[in-house]
Amino acid sequence: MIHSELLFYLSMTMIVSGIVAFFVLLFVPSPYGRNANSAFGPPVPAKIAWLIQEIPAFLIPVYFIIELLFFKTSDSANVRDAILLLAPFIMHYFQRSLIYPMLIREGKPMPAVPFLLAFIFCIYNGYLQSSYIINYAAAGYALFAAGMAGNIHSDQILRSLRKPGETGYKIPHGGLFSLVSGANFLAEIIEWTGFALLNRSLPAVAFALFTAANTAPRAWHHHLWYLKKFGDEYPKNRKAILPYLI
Ligand code: NDP
């Protein structure tokens, strides 16, 4: 199973178990605090339980950052982005695992079952959030930056084809145009795909899809138009929008 699939299944499992938990917890109150129940295992002192069960969600992202900083050859922009994106998660679990337990006053002991479930959840979630951000969200920044640079560069190539006062069309060369006719469009799609990867939001995904739906057909029509207008003069290996493919 590839890594992105693993994260997808872990996320879906979390959503499905969240839905199941919602219905179960409507009928069985979470068995800790005021609802603590000895049927759910021997008691663990509240401060210790909160410290141990939550600390994985703090330590796992910190471990990922340390690994990125000292044991992986990543470019410094990627490291900075990963730190920025993981910072809110790390801050929350620093507070929850190291400060909050110290502030608890006369907290009721935590039965072992909810303690263990919370502990497992914090490992699961700590891995899921950190692994996504380290591997994909930081890459999203890089993809966005590369797409934006490619888009500006391609637009500039097109602009420079005309001398002042000219309105006709010439064959663009250089940059992404050596691969596709719709170089500015391909770069625009890469840009918003990176943005979606980075943001993980439905609006961002919608925009990336809309951009592709809007610009890929335009690239295709431009390509056919170039082939018709320039015939044999047009570079043979150049595709419409997807290098080497379409
Ligand atoms: P085009 O490639 O059709 O045109 C860009 C400019 O270059 C126009 O001024 C055009 O002149 C000129 N031009 C194009 N081809 C040639 C050529 N062969 N020779 C000389 N001049 C040429 O791009 P669009 O106008 O469709 O888009 C402009 C920007 O907006 C792009 O960066 C694109 O990625 C972005 N965009 C983003 C969308 C999104 O959904 N996010 C949707 C649409 C565009 P003329 O006008 O005379 O053809």
Image (cartoon, rainbow, N blue to C red):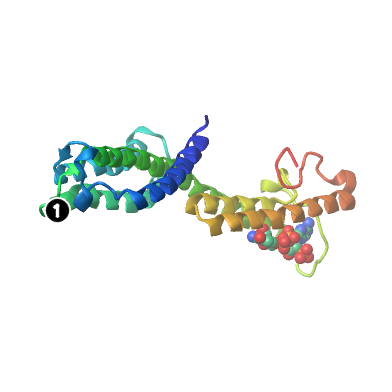
| Residue 11 rendering spot, x and y as whole percentages | 46, 43
**Amino acid on which disc 1 is placed:** Ile
Query: Is residue 163 in view from this perspective?
Result: no
Question: How many marks on residues?
Answer: 1
Name the residue nearer the viewer: 15 or 238.
15
Label 1: few (<14), some (14–19) or many (≥20) C-alpha neighbours in 10 Å: few
Q: Answer with the quadrant where ligand 1 appears in the image.
A: bottom right
| Residue 93 rendering spot, x and y as whole percentages | 27, 49
Name the residue nearer the viewer: 150 or 194.
194
Which quarter of the figure is the C terminus placed in? top right
What residue is shown with label 1?
104
Q: Residue at x 76, y 43 (%)?
A: 239
Q: Residue furthest top?
A: 1
Q: Residue furthest left?
A: 106
Q: Secondary structure at mark 1?
A: loop
Q: Is residue 200 left or right of residue 188?
A: left
